[in-house]
Amino acid sequence: MKMDLEQLRKTAAEVAAREEVKYLVGWKQGTYGYRVAPAFVEDAAGAAELIFSPLCTANLATYLTLAEQLPVPRGGEPDDRKVALMVKGCDSRAVTQLLVEKGIERDEVVVIGCPCPGVVDAALLAEKYPETEEPAEMKWDGENFLLIRGGEETKIARNEILAEKCRLCRYPNPVVSDIMLGEEVETWDLAEDEGVQELENRDVDGRAEYWAEQFDKCVRCYSCRNVCPLCYCQDCILDRLNPTWVNRSVNFSENTAFNIARAFHLAGRCIECGECERVCPANIPLGKLNRKLAREVRDKYDFEPGVDPDAEPFQASFKPDDPEDFIL
Amino acid sequence: MSAMLLKKEKWPEFVEKLAGKNIWAPQAEGDAMRFAPVAEGEAPALDYNNTRVPPKGALFPQTETMFKFQPEGAQVDEPQLEQETVVLGLRPCDARAMAIVEKLFKWDIDDPYYTRRRELTTLVGLACNEPGMNCFCPSVGGGPASTEGLDLLMADLGENYLLEAVTKKGEALLTETKDLLDEAGVDAVKEKEKLVGEAEQKIKRTVDTEGVPEGLPGLWEDPLWQKVSASCLGCGTCTYLCPTCHCFDIQDETEGLAARRCRMWDSCMFDEYTMHTSGHNPRPTRRERTRNRISHKYSYYVDKFDVIACVGCGRCTNLCPVNIDIIETIRQVKEAL
């Protein structure tokens, strides 16, 4: 896979300079170690800092719905220019799902697709190759990753540090885009979802015990909710005080209510970008919960979110032959 | 200040001596660490860098029941705190944070919950030999072996721990465990000082705070806040994991017919934090919230209590999902001054 940075920056500069574009959201090198930060590019010059590398894990689609709408001052005009967005395969599914749900309109975005051979699990990488203050660079190199820092290059086998979401990825190429950068990548053999399988093999008590332990750690920072491109309700039940659906008390019961509500709300909507799990400061394996529900939806209803922009939203549609065997 | 030595093999016995007290210590949880009560008969391992969630909950629990009440009758049941607690192995930055936060909790009135817990708690720190990548405690008045806020400081000398009492409570703990301890010689103290010096050398990142506290209010409308907050998700990671963040909310919660009034951590990064009943929000966007978070730590708190409310532990920077880096933010503030 060849990612031509020059081409990327040139294209981004051209898009950011368009009059119809408010800003472009892409990735830039972070302030230290393996960090990559979201970049908001407002003009052609700003595109020079953009990168696309195996460290670009973040799904930037969340910024489509996270952008704050301030009241327009009297006599002013609302700024309804487009937002340009760089997407990997998984990220593009979030855009598609937002289109399906009418969370955004197609003409509000310019999608720049980046075919993605898979990103790294930065935590795993840091475990094997300790992070230092110096910002590191990374590249794809055939079947390997190339870690570049301090003038040294280290070749790391792909499977050693590939992110879990990428091991399970069926859509490395963007499913929606206005501009595609580089060539499409070939899909790869999928790994078994061992995390989910292992839990499925436990009995109900075993599963309850597992999740009790996990939810007990939750500090309710809501980073999983906020990072999720598909958690974009203007008025979230978690923030409601009148009535209070979920108490503010942080304990196992309330934490479970929150985590289950979040997971169910994403059933048939989660596009498995893995951001919730990546950002969780308590290391709760939220991906397993989401992927289990995604699998149920796929197996029972033959539905996969974020693939077809013309699909009907899963939770808002009904077919007479939908299975009902879960109704007691 | 008396200095004693504890052989590492006697560590389990040392912990055992404290039986009857509530012991908090760093504990592994998957691949993360957090402070949690230690089960009886267990000796926590202290080979850790720092916990993700700070130990502030030992004095300021994330959720605290202030009292319970019934809908009928004016019966109020107020839990009494009596249990003595020892926090083992907290890092000097986190103890310093407690000393900083205490200024607020003892400011106009003594906050009964915080002060009672502090009275009942002995804080046993552990000096850092291996600071983390984003540690910058010396830049904000701390250090890898700072004793501020601590009752007792431990230092890892390889085969032994050096124990130095800082307060009377620390002395009392040394007396309680004296059977297990040996007098520390000058050499041990020198060895510790050498390790502290080396640890300081390992701290690579720094912030320059000169002029920042006075200058921040003048940057109210500066474009830097838009820049810093552009990528902010508005989650509570930076504040909940911050050892000096101390904002709380008070809520009445019901369970069946019983009700309780509790206070719980709150975060100025949440939009509902400043939301008025009218629907008006004086901090309507993440720009204002970010400005407040930084200004509170680096200016307002300094104005009121003469100390920066940031201890340089690096947690907000380590765990921000979008790489909002407080060291970089202060650098940008300096640049804008």
Image: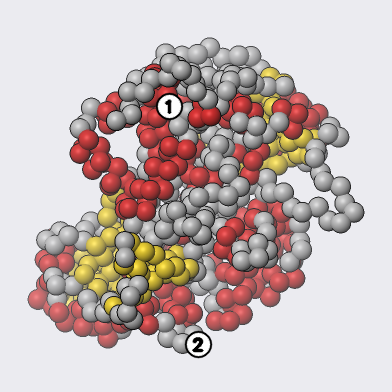
| Badge 2 density bin: few <14, some 14–19, many ≥20, Cα 10 Å | few
Kind of residue at disc 2: Asp
- Say which quadrant the C terminus of chain A sits in: top left
Q: Can residue B92 be seen in the rendering of this structure?
A: no
Q: Is residue A216 left or right of residue A117?
A: left
Which residue is located at x 66 percent, y 38 percent?
A64
Which residue lies most toward the left here? B179
Q: Position of residue B288 (x, y in %)?
A: 67, 61
Task: Please give the chain letter of the residue carrying mark 2.
Answer: B
Q: Does label 2 lie on the same chain as label 1?
A: no
Residue, disc 2: B108
Q: Is residue B115 above or below residue B14?
A: below
Question: Closer to the camera, B147 or A89?
Answer: A89
- Say which quadrant the N terminus of chain A sits in: top right
Q: Is residue A123 above or below residue A215?
A: above
Q: Position of residue B86 (x, y in %)?
A: 25, 72
Task: Please give the chain letter of the residue carrying mark 1.
Answer: A
Kind of residue at disc 1: Ala
Instruction: Answer with the quarter of the image where residue B166 lies.
Output: bottom left
Q: Is residue B7 above or below residue B150?
A: above
Instruction: Answer with the quarter of the image where residue A58 lies.
Output: top right
Check disc 2 and report its element: helix, strand or loop: loop
Q: Is residue B138 left or right of residue A60?
A: left
Q: Can residue A233 be seen in the rendering of this structure?
A: yes
| Badge 1 density bin: few <14, some 14–19, many ≥20, Cα 10 Å | many
Residue, disc 1: A294
Q: Position of residue A92 (x, y in %)?
A: 60, 26
Residues tagged 1 and 2 counted as in contact (Cβ below 8 A): no
Which residue is located at x 68 percent, y 75 percent?
B214
